[in-house]
Image (cartoon, rainbow, N blue to C red):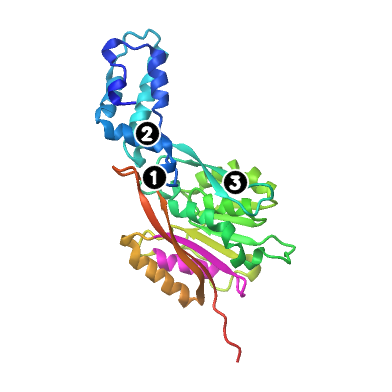
Amino acid sequence: MHVLDLPPLYTRPPAERLLDLLGKLARGLEGFDSVEKNEDLNESVEWIRGSEGLPRYLTGIISSPLSWIEDEQTQVDIWEAASKRLSERSGRTAMPSASRTFRIPSIASPGCSEISITLTEPSLTGDNLGHKTWVASYLLAKRLPHLLPLLPCLSPPASPCLPRILELGAGTGLVGIAFATLFPTHVSLTDLPSILPNLAANLSANIAHVSTRGSVADAFALDWAQLPPPNTLSDADKYDVIIAADSLYSPDHPKLLVNTIGAYLKSGDAARVAVELPLRKAYERERDEMKMRMRGIGLVVLEEGEERGWDDWVGRDGRAEVRCWWGVWAREKVPEV
């Protein structure tokens, strides 16, 4: 449909037609797969490319008194719907709170080819970037089943205790919830206090899947700048696997992140760290420093690679391709004397 096919307001279109049209124009959060696979995204891009008249049309509805529509509540419903459609086309930061369902391939859950995780993403603000699910998180969540051979704590013979998993900078919780849904584990999702309410709500919304897998999961605040004093945590209080995705946003983060990993990662050859980072040019120095600091605490890369995904910061061509690096780290073995 082209913008010129929209019913002109001077023709006084019925309220039912306007509400139906505004419903069809709803544009949710985009998926992270190739845009060729996302018909809704292609349609949205066509609207934007076809004409700049759609925002103008929506603004016209908002400013119209809709005097030919007698019911006042119906008028309000139309104004509100038009306002939402306009905000959805004003950039990611202008979008209202929304839910998004992620489908993660599963080779671990019996009789199930994929798992579905539904997350709420509040309106995004500059100081709460953890309210958005970033593409690196989605890619790491999809990779988890394939990392099974690299995670000895998940392999038989099973320990009587569930393996302990810690997600740092969990944001909306996708990777940690996926981990707990794929493998029987005790997963702790952590982030700053301002992110925690939405993180905890997302965990609660998906807890049935977690419990079905025989896992336990919790969420709590963890500030990387306020770590416990050295040697105060026993190894039993530490974690078998630490996971983090898209966790470098300032020059301070490499040191803070690696110090946190050093404080909470168990000793022993079975301990692992799984990281996925977007290859943003602006943070190349931070990535290099993080890798250097990881080696400095005795960790080495077991396996690594690059992959790509599509984020929902849609550009003029409808694509926002993001290249990411992933790596699994283990403690360096000390040669026997």
233 lies left or right of 170: right
Q: Position of residue 226 (x, y in %)?
A: 48, 63
Distance between the Cα atoms at labels 1 and 2?
15 Å
Name the mark on residue 115. Answer: 3
Which one is in front in this view, the residue at disc 2 or the one at disc 3?
Answer: 2
The residue singled out by tag 1 in the image is: 312
Name the mark on residue 144. Answer: none
Q: Residue at x 35, y 24 (%)?
A: 82
The magenta segment: 253-278
Q: Residue at x 43, y 40 (%)?
A: 38
* Towards the viewer: 227 or 257: 257
Residue 193 higher or lower than 38, as above or below:
below
Which image quadrant for residue 60? top left
* Towards the viewer: 214 or 230: 214
Q: Residue at x 42, y 20 (%)?
A: 20
Distance between the Cα atoms at labels 2 and 3?
27 Å
